[in-house]
Image (tube, rainbow, N blue to C red):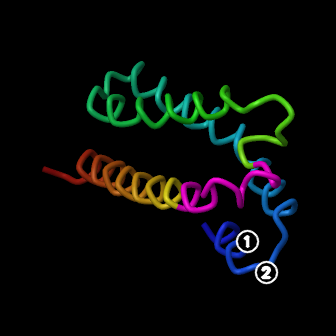
Amino acid sequence: IITLSDLECDYINARSCCSKLNKWVVPEVIGHAVVTVLMLISLHWFIFLLNLPVATWNIYRYIMVPSGNMGVFDPTEIHNRGQLKSHMKEAMIKLGFHLLCFFMYLYRLVSRIAPR
């Protein structure tokens, strides 16, 4: 969010912004896929079903990168077609999702450890 905001305010150029963001796309896809599979294996159905659409979206977004683009974030297209706003919106939604998951995981941890 901060990197996209810096690009929006012209503090950094599009190429450096996109290279910084593209560096984290593959670890995000792998990490989210691993967490989703672990929730399936451990039979946490609600959390698995909550993570499945986000993991699917991350994989779809990574696979559908047009050939010739630098990655998911492309400096030549980020200002065209309103992609900057859509990337900002997606980043905010993911931030909300990860905050929700954090508090759900924290609640589950505390409810298992606390004496009854």
Residue 107 vs 50, above or below: the answer is below
Residue 55 lies, in percent from the top left, at: 50, 32
Point out residue 13 in the picture as x, y percentages from the top left corner. 84, 70
**Which quadrant holds residue 84?**
bottom right
Q: Position of residue 31 (x, y in %)?
A: 61, 37
Q: Which residue is tagged 1?
A: 7
Q: What is the chief secondary structure element of the magenta stretch?
A: helix
Q: Which mark is residue 11?
A: 2
Residue found at x 23% / y 50% = 111
State yes or no: discs 1 and 2 in contact (Cβ < 8 Å).
yes
Is 70 on the left-hand or right-hand side of 95?
right
Residue plotted at (84% across, 42% down) = 70
User: Of all residues shown, which one is farthest toward the left?
Assistant: 116
Q: Residues within 10 Å of mark 1 (few under 14, many from 20)?
A: many
Rendered location of residue 50, percent (x, y): 34, 36
User: Residue 87 colored magenta?
Assistant: yes
Above/below status of 8 relative to 54: below
From the image, which quarter does the N terminus lie in?
A: bottom right
> Residue 54: which numbered mark, if any?
none
- Residue lying furthest top in this view? 41
Asked if 43 appears above or below 114 in the picture, the reply is above
Q: Secondary structure at mark 2?
A: loop
Q: Amino acid at mark 1?
A: Leu
Q: Counting other residues with Cα less than 10 Å from the Cα at mark 2, is it few (<14), some (14-19), or many (20 or more)?
A: few
Residue at 64%, 32% in the rendered image: 30
- Residue for point 31% across, 28% down: 44
Q: Which residues are magenta?
A: 74-88
Total numbered labels: 2
1 horizontally vs 96: left or right: right
